[in-house]
Each structure stands twice: as structure tokens, then as C-alpha cells.
Image (tube, helix red, strand yellow):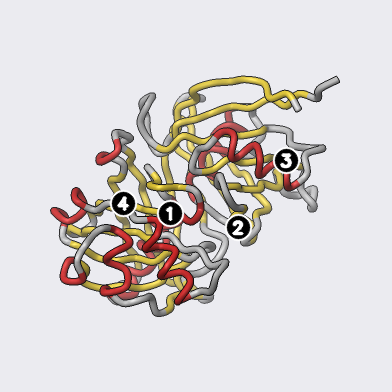
Amino acid sequence: MAKSYEFVTLDVFTDRRFGGNPLAVIADARGLDTATMQALAGEFNLSETTFVLPPDDPRHTAKVRIFTPSAEIGFAGHPNIGTAWMLAAQGRDTHGRLTFEGGSGLVEIDVERDRGELRMCRLMTPKALSLSAAPDAADLAPCAGLDAVDIRQTDVASVGLDCVCAEVAVEVLARAAPDASAFRAVADRWLGPQGRFMLCLYARDGNQLRSRVFGPLYGVTEDPACGSATAALAGLLLERDGASNNQLVMQMGEEIGRPSVLHTGAQRGDDGVRVWLAGQCVEMTRGTVFL
């Protein structure tokens, strides 16, 4: 007899259906092995799918594993926000707080409600900001169908998952187009044959940002709303500005018909630059997987 697993899908980083970034959540993944989780993520074929398991430490809410269609990753923004929203809707938070055990460390999430209705979930990234050198513009430009002169500056930033950030003019975003073969060529030269990276193209106007994130080597041609890249970018811009804190609003997804809004900010602390990320969600579907 087939075993059944319940799932929920949500649109994340939006307050309306058919916007944001879709996410599938298996609310009780006990009994699933890694290969089956990966196969299910490929079956859903969304940017990410999460699998909720009992925590190793009973003081925490859950262990959450995150899979793209082709790989498991240690941290991502929209899977944590969406999973938190779903668990909070079930009353699984404790005094408005959830703690997830993730592949990159603990993710603390605060839940905001208004008259009992969920309003926002806000997480602190599991790691302080780290920065490193990225491939130069001449290497990265073909990955997005651009010319080297279109890219102003490149960096690798991470708050739990590495992201190559490349600054461009806002008009460049509309004509960018990912090229998987160019991604593979750059990854092979830079990271080795099994290497993967995602590319965040962004344009800035004060505290307003627009971006597009491409990750074909993760099975995600374009991510409608990428929280890990947005959070990493908030930390990167804080370092560039030399400020003590910032608060930014990111617009994503317009180019592919999934308008998304991500709120983020960074502040300096004793252990480096720490970043928060927040957004809303809309539950879309519920169903059953039979295995």
C-alpha cells in the first residue's frame, strides 16, 4: 500500500495569489529519505520544496530541509518564510517565535499578527555576512546575455548561501536572459566540474532595489523572489555604504509575471553584519503525495 504525505503550496513574498515565489511544503516528512525528497522537489519543479522533520533539539520548532529541483541547499529565504507561515497558521509558533534547524545553522523567525491574522514573518539569517571575490564582468556577462560594459561591479556575498551579486543599470534588467551553458563554463573554470552558483543582477535607487536572480545550475532558470540573495545584498550594501544599519525594499519577479516584495535590512553586531528578511505569504493549494 502506498504511503501518503500531505503538502501545502504557498505564494511567498506577496499578499495576492499568483504573485511571489511558489513553494511546496511537506509538513511531516518523517520516513522520507534524501533521494525521495530530491525526487519530490523535482516533481514539484518549483524554486524550492521544504521538508519538515522533528528537531534534533526539542527546544526548537522543527528541522527544515530545503531542495531545489536538482540539489539540497543549506539556506534560502522564501522556503523559510513560507514554511514559517504555514506552521504559524497551524499554531506551531511559541509566543510568536519559531526556530528552524537548517543546513546552514539555526534560523530564528518572528511571526507578526494583526487581530489574530498572520501579517508578516521575519527571519534572522543563520550566518553573519561573508564577502569574497567574484568572477569579473567579462566572465559573468554572458551568463545573463549581457556585455561586460553592462556590469558595474561584482561580489560574492553570503548569509548562508553564496550568491554572485552584479550591479547593473535598471534598464539592463529587462533585457537580461540566462544562458545555462555560459553558467556551466564559468562554474567549471571558477569552482570546478561540480560547482554551482546563482547570479543576482540588481539595480539600486536609494533604499529601493530591483533584481533578477538566475540559477540554472540549481534547476532554477529564474527565481521569482530570492530571499537568500536579497539578504546577502542587504549586507553587502551596508558594507559598501559604511553605515551602521540599513532597511531596504526589494522588487522582484515583474519580468516573469510573479511580482514580489521583500523587506530586508542589516546591522552591525559583535559577530559581524547580521541581516533580517521579511515577507507575506498566501496559501494556494493543499494535497496528498502517494509514494
**Mark 2 nearby-residue class (10 Å; few <14, some 14–19, many ≥20):** some
Residue carrying label 2:
74
Q: Earlier in the sequence, mark 2 or mark 4?
A: 2
**Mark 1 nearby-residue class (10 Å; few <14, some 14–19, many ≥20):** many
Q: Earlier in the sequence, mark 3 or mark 1?
A: 3
Quarter assignment of residue 198: bottom left
Tell me how far mark 2 sits from mark 1, CA to CA.
15 Å
Residue carrying label 1:
215
Labels in figure, total = 4
Q: Position of residue 12 (x, y in %)?
A: 44, 36
Q: Nearer the viewer, residue 205 or 270?
A: 205
**Mark 3 nearby-residue class (10 Å; few <14, some 14–19, many ≥20):** few
Q: Please, which residue is most extreme toward the right here? A: 1
Disc 3 marks which amino acid? Thr
Residue 212 numbered tag: 4
Residue 36 numbered tag: 3
Look at 42% across and 68% down and name the residue there: 185
Q: Nearer the observer, disc 3 or disc 4?
A: 3
